[in-house]
Image (cartoon, grey):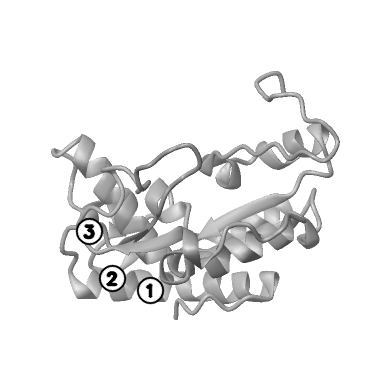
């Protein structure tokens, strides 16, 4: 709280830290700070998320073992290693369970990472509605950047240059064996189904 600016009536203060959603102590701490906090969670297909996570680590440390070696406890039995954070983070239903002990579902908005790319204005419309804001950010604020493979903001406030995600976003993923991807898809399927039920949203990952 001491790091936050003072928020006047009619203002909203936002803070973004991806690890909140998967940190066991976070829901209790946030609840104790303010039980009126609105929570926005951006999720994407957990298999793609795990590969993206690995890609980022690989760019910083090229000597790490292969994705396959880290993802499996035992490759011959197909046993997935859920202690590896790249895998564990994608078990969204488990993390949400922890949050629902403190906050009702009505305090959450689940944003689709895939739709954020295919329809950024639509997803941002949902975000603005959830926060009780006027729909100011619309289609006219975005254009699709072919090089990045992502939508970018045309001209952010106070700047004449378009704003795109940084170098660490949109980098090509290493080629992962199809059987490894399929095994991970099977592993996540029951967790995804539970997550769809819990949120009342089908994210179309299966």
Q: Which quarter of the figure has residue 15?
A: top right
Q: Residues within 10 Å of mark 1 (few under 14, many from 20)?
A: some
For the residues labelled 1 and 2, say whether their Cβ atoms are less than 8 Å apart: yes
In the image, what residue occupies the spot 79% across and 61% down?
106
Residue 188, position in %: x, y?
45, 70
Q: How many marks?
A: 3
Q: Nearer the viewer, residue 72 or 10?
A: 10
* Horizontal arrangement in the rendering, residue 156 relative to residue 129 (left or right): left
Q: Which residue is mark 1?
A: 185
Residue 18 in the figure: left or right of residue 130 = left
The residue indicated by pointer 2 is: 181
Dot 3 or dot 2: first in sequence order is 3
Task: Quickly name the residue at label 3.
Answer: 68
- Report the quarter where the C terminus lies: bottom left
x, y (%) of residue 168? 28, 44
Q: Is residue 72 visible?
A: no
Give the SS element for disc 2. Answer: helix
- Taking depth in this image into account, of 2 and 79 the one nearest to the observer is 2
Q: Is residue 179 left or right of residue 152?
A: left
What percent of the width, then of the height, locates residue 129? 72, 62
SS for callout 3: helix
| Residue drawn at 46 percent across, 45 percent down | 156
Q: Residue at x 44, y 68 (%)?
A: 114
Q: Is residue 54 visible?
A: yes
Disc 2 packing (10 Å; few <14; some 14–19; many ≥20): some
Residue 59, compared with residue 80, is above or below; it is above
Please name whichever residue, 16 or 188, is drawn nearer the observer in this view of the structure: 16
Disc 1 is placed on an element classified as: helix
Q: CA distance from mark 1 to mark 2?
A: 6 Å
Among the 4 quarters of the image, the one containing residue 174: bottom left
Q: CB atoms at circles 3 and 2 under 8 Å apart? A: no
First-in-chain label (1 vs 3): 3
């Amino acid at each position: 709280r001491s790091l936050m600016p003072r928020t006047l009536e009619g203002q909203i203060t936002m803070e973004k830290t991806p690890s909140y959603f998967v940190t066991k102590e976070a829901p209790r701490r946030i609840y104790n700070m303010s039980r009126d906090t609105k929570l926005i969670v951006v999720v994407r297909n957990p298999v793609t998320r795990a590969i993206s996570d690995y890609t980022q680590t690989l760019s910083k440390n090229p000597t790490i073992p292969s994705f396959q070696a880290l993802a499996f406890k035992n490759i011959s039995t197909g046993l997935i290693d859920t202690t590896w954070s790249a895998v564990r983070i994608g078990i969204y239903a488990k993390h949400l369970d922890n949050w629902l002990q403190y906050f009702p579902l009505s305090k959450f908005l689940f944003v689709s990472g895939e739709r954020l790319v295919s329809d950024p204005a639509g997803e941002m419309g949902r975000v603005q509605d959830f926060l009780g804001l006027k729909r100011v950010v619309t289609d006219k604020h975005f254009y699709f950047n072919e090089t990045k493979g992502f939508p970018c903001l045309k001209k952010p406030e106070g700047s004449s240059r378009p704003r795109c995600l940084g170098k660490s976003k949109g980098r090509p993923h290493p080629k992962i064996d199809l059987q490894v991807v399929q095994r991970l898809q099977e592993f996540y399927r029951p967790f995804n189904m539970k997550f769809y039920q819990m949120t009342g949203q089908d994210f179309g990952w299966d």
